[in-house]
Structures are given as structure tokens and as C-alpha cells.
Amino acid sequence: MANTAQTVEREAPQAAEVKWQKPSNFKRFLKRAWDCKILLAMLLPALTYVIIFSYIPMTGIVLAFKKYNYVDGIYGSPWVGFDNFKFLIVSNKLWPLTRNTLLYNIVFIFLGMLLAVAFAIMINELTNKVFKKIFQSFMFLPYFISWVVVQAIFQAIFGFEYGIFNHIIEFFGAERINFYASPDGWPVLLVFFKMWKMVGYDCIVYLAAVAGIDQGMYEAASIDGANIWQRIRHITLPSLIPTMVIMGLLAVGQIFRGDFGLFYQLVGNNAVILKAADILDTFIYRSLMQTNDYGMSSAAGLYQSCLCFITILIVNKIVKIIEPDYTLF
Amino acid sequence: MKRKNKIFQADLAAFKLLGYVLVFIWGMLCFLPFLLVVMNSFTSEANIMRNGYSFWPGEWTLEAYKTCLENPERIGFAYRNTIIATIVGTVLSVLMSTMTGYVLHRKDFPWRNGFSFFFYFTTLFNGGLVPWYLMCTRYLGFKNNYLALVVPMLFSVWQMILAKNFMKGGIPFEIIESAKVDGANDFTIYWKLVIPLAKPLIATLSLFAALTFWNDWYNCMLFMNKNNMKNLQYFLHEMLSSIQALQELVSMGKVNLLNEESANLPQQSMKMAMTCITTGPILLLYPFVQKYFVKGLTIGAVKG
């Protein structure tokens, strides 16, 4: 490269036929980098962070194919091929976990969207400002607490000895229910608490979207004789579809990742309930921290990450075909 | 929205009635559990033993709070850890996301798409819990120290994207260009120009970050086993899991399991009091900061 520069300089005086040779691509690259050196420097903290905490751990997925022991570390432990995965399948863990994770998330997404959109539409039609303000605040409140606090609330309501739920049903003559003694009813409870916590948050997004719909359309429709249900069906809902699609896509991309806080706090390590309520995330956590089975945990983790990634690719492809504006990338 | 036509619309009235009823029910469902917790934190333990949890304390008392705060070392540490982690974490986190968002929004930055994807890809695929955990504990030493409380949540790609989109929409590029012409370097532009203009963004990011740090218990569960390094949420979690709490009380000599008196030691109400103490600050601040969260959600979520 140095030669090229010298050649250029020597040839320059022959102005008539000089052909300015572009500096090599590498040199241009260096120059551009130097020009924005400050920007690049500003990028360094986040870059380092992401490399350390996201990219380097990606190399750790080899652990799924190894039998980890502490002495040899990640890179020294012996290979066992697909044994970890085989064990997960054979011990009938992989499928129930996947099914639970997927089913719960599907319900969370659909029911959550239904409730959030319904409430947004309803709240938008209400006229009393004080009522709206108070009850919107109430609805948003559960978002701000952690799942630990939800656990406290759960115990206060559904506890066996002192819970207010048992108190009430006993008052009506029924027998106390010990929720911690059986897996029955837990899917409903878990779905309810998830909705309780997230609907307020999603509702706000949809409210903003609904509030932004052009009022003229509604007035024209009501002049034409449309009643409120028709107005909702033909104006509000179609206008909300872009928002719903975006929220839906973001959610579907994470459909194999469960809400760890919800499941871990409410269900805990109760083996009885785990049959109905164990998901991939809680299994991975327990395998790591309690049974110290690094191989299984990594195998399940890799399985989960791959499923998520494939789902995102598929969903993105589908969306690209239907409506290219909404693709994630 | 005023209805211009004064004709009574039965369908609209019916819908509004339905709306009021359903929203009322759901709103109450959201609010009542909190009322339950607060009320029962002021109830005597004996009352709870007799009647279970209820919405009106049969006997008003502060004994639950007294017991909680009586052993201030434990709670003191928990509060201290949570507050330090929240303040330090929020400041660093906001700095990181705004700075990165700033760089990636600069139209004149040649590799911005590449880097954006580099960051975004981490939300699509990751190596799972185990490699991350090994990285943190084995190679970075996150055990029983503040690093473990703060670093794992320092950088969030979503917050960076939020920052980037805000700056794209809210800060005219001409300002940056003219600053460059005036000779300011990129960092000065960021620090002296963009940050002051991005106050709503910083408010929103700070609140989201502060909430995340205050509510975190997962990192304690993974990385802490020394009592003085646990934070509020994790402390509450242990108490709710009961076993630990009882053991603690026994080891403090406060509970002799054979002693009759100890049966009255506030346990249920103590759990409720502890819950109030843990989440109280958030709920007290809530009315004031609610609108920033709403704004943040609507800027960020819809544009993605």
C-alpha cells in the first residue's frame, strides 16, 4: 500500500494522463473509523457489555454437549454428544415442559390482547373523567410490583389456613381448598395472575392507539346509522390492527420463553404443582441451581434458544409475505 | 369526546354501562389485593389466626411493623442494598442506553446499521442461563458483592432502541450538524446538547430502570448467600418462603419453638408489613410518576 501512495505521488506531475488511484479500501476504512473515533469510543461500553454478557456466553452452548465438571471448566469438560438431550426426551421432561411453556404463553398472548383491547375500547367510550383516571390508575398498579409481592398477595388470598378466599367459601358452607396440595386449578390461577399483572400495561398502549383514531369516521358512521357495535367492529378494530400486530409479533418471538418470576414465585418448588406448572425456564433454573446438572440445564437452554430463534425467523418470513411493513428485520 | 347529536342512543348507553361495570370490576380486582395487604399489616396476629385475612383489621396494631423494624440490621442492610443498587444502576443504565442510542441514531455514522443489528441480535438468540451464570460467577466474580446487584441489568437493548427512536424523532439533526460546524466534538454534542434536550426520555428511562432495579430479586437468588448483601425483594421472598424466616428467628433467640408466647409472634401480619415496607416507596411514588411511564410506553411500544 505504501507503494501505491508513492506511485501516485510520482505520477501526479504528469497531469495530462494522471489517474488518481483511490486509496485502498482498508485505508478508507481506517480513515472513516478515525473520523468517528469519538462515536466509536462512546459505543465501547455497551459493546463490551454485550460481548461479555451475550456473545461470549453463546460459545458456552457447547456445554449442552458436554458433561460439565468444575475442574475442567466449560472448555475442558468431556464431550457426550447428544446424551443430555436424549436424557431429557427419555425422562419425559422435554415435551411436557415445552407444551406447558407454549400453551401458557399462547393463552397469555391471546387472552391478554383480548382483555387489553376490550378494556381500551371500553375506557375510551367512558365519559366520566374522574372515574377514568382512578380506574386506569388501579389497572396499571399491578405492573409496578414484583412477583414476590404478588406471592404475598396470593398467600393472603389463597392461603390454606388464613386466606380470605377460603374464609369466604367456608362462610357459604363449602370446604376449604388447599391450593398447594394439588395441581388442579393452577393453570387458571396462573393465567389470572398474569392477566392481572399485565393487562393494565398493555391497555395503555392500545388506549393511546384508540385515542388517535380520527373521530370524523365515527361521526360519519353514526350518521349512516351504525350503532356502537358496528362502529367498533368496522372502525376501531381495523384501526387497532397495526398496534395489535406489532405487540403480537414481539410477544410471539418470545413464545418459548416463559415468565420466570410468575412461575417461580407462585409455584416455587412445590413438586405436586410442578406437574401442571413447570416451564422450560423454571426447569433450567432448578437444574442449574438446585440439582447442579449443568449439562441438562444447558441442553434445555440451547433447545429453548433455538426454538425461539426459529420461531422468530418463521414469523418474520410469514409477515414479510403478508405485510412487509411489519417485519422485525 | 362530545356527542353532537342529542338523540339518546340506547346502544351507546348500554355499551357505556357495560364499560363502567366491567372496568369497575377489573379496577377493583386490581386494587383490592393491595388494600388487603395494607389492612392486614395493621392487624394483630391473633386476629388473623382467628379470622383469617380480612379487609378490616379487627384489632388495629403496629406490632407487625415493630417486629420487622426491630431487627434493623437485617432490614437496614436490605434497604441499603436496594437503594444503592437502584441509584447506581439507574444512573449507569441511563447513561449507557442514551449514549449508545445517540451513537446509533447519528445518520452520519457509517456502521450504524451493522452495530444496531449486533445489539439487536442479542434479543433474538442467547446462550442460555448456564453459560451466562458461569461467566458471571466463575470469570467475573459476581458473588456477594454489589457488582452482582448492578451489572447484570445495566444494559437493555430495548432501552437503547427507545433512546434511539426518541432522538431520531425528537432532536432535529440540524442542531447536531450546526454544532459540528461550530467545532464541537461528538461527545460534547451528546453531553451538552442532546442530553438536555432529551429530558422526557431520561425521565422515562430512569423510571423504568429504577423500577427494574428496585424490584429485582433474581440476581440475589443467583449470586448472594451472605445475609448482609441481600436486597429488599429477596428478603421478602425469603420471609414468604417461611422456612428461612423461622430459622432466622430461632437463631436470633427470638423464637423458642416450645414457648407458648412465640406462637403469637407476628408471622402473617409480619409478612404483610414486610410487603408494605418493600413495595411502599414504589406505590407512594406511583401517582407522581405514572404519566411518565404512560408516555414512555406509548413512544416506545408502538414504534418498536
Image (cartoon, grey):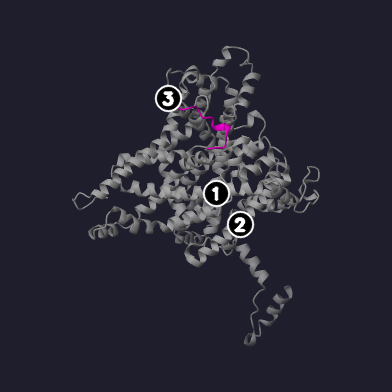
What's the residue type where badge 3 is placed?
Answer: Phe
Identify the chain of the residue marked 2, using the numbered disc in the image: A
Measured along the vertical axis of the image, is residue A211 above or below residue A5? above
Q: Does the magenta stretch include residue B37?
A: no
- Magenta residues, start to end: A171-184
- Estimate how packed mark 3 is, as few (under 14), some (14 to 19) or many (20 or more) residues with alpha carbons within 10 Å: few
Whole-Å distance between the Cαs marked 3 and 1?
Answer: 35 Å
| Furthest residue toward bottom | A16
Question: Disc 3 or 1, which lies upstream in sequence?
Answer: 1
- Tags 2 and 3 in contact by the CB under 8 Å rule? no
| Furthest residue toward left | B6
Confirm whether circles 1 and 2 share one chain: yes
Q: Where residue B118 sits: x, y (%)?
A: 61, 58
Measured along the vertical axis of the image, is residue A181 above or below residue B101? above
Compared across the picture, whether A24 is left or right of A225 comes to right
Tag 1, which secondary structure?
A: helix
Identity of the residue drawn at 44% across and 48% down = A202
Q: Is residue A49 at all visible to an observer of this figure? A: yes
Whole-Å distance between the Cαs marked 2 and 3?
Answer: 51 Å
What's the residue type where badge 2 is placed?
Answer: Phe
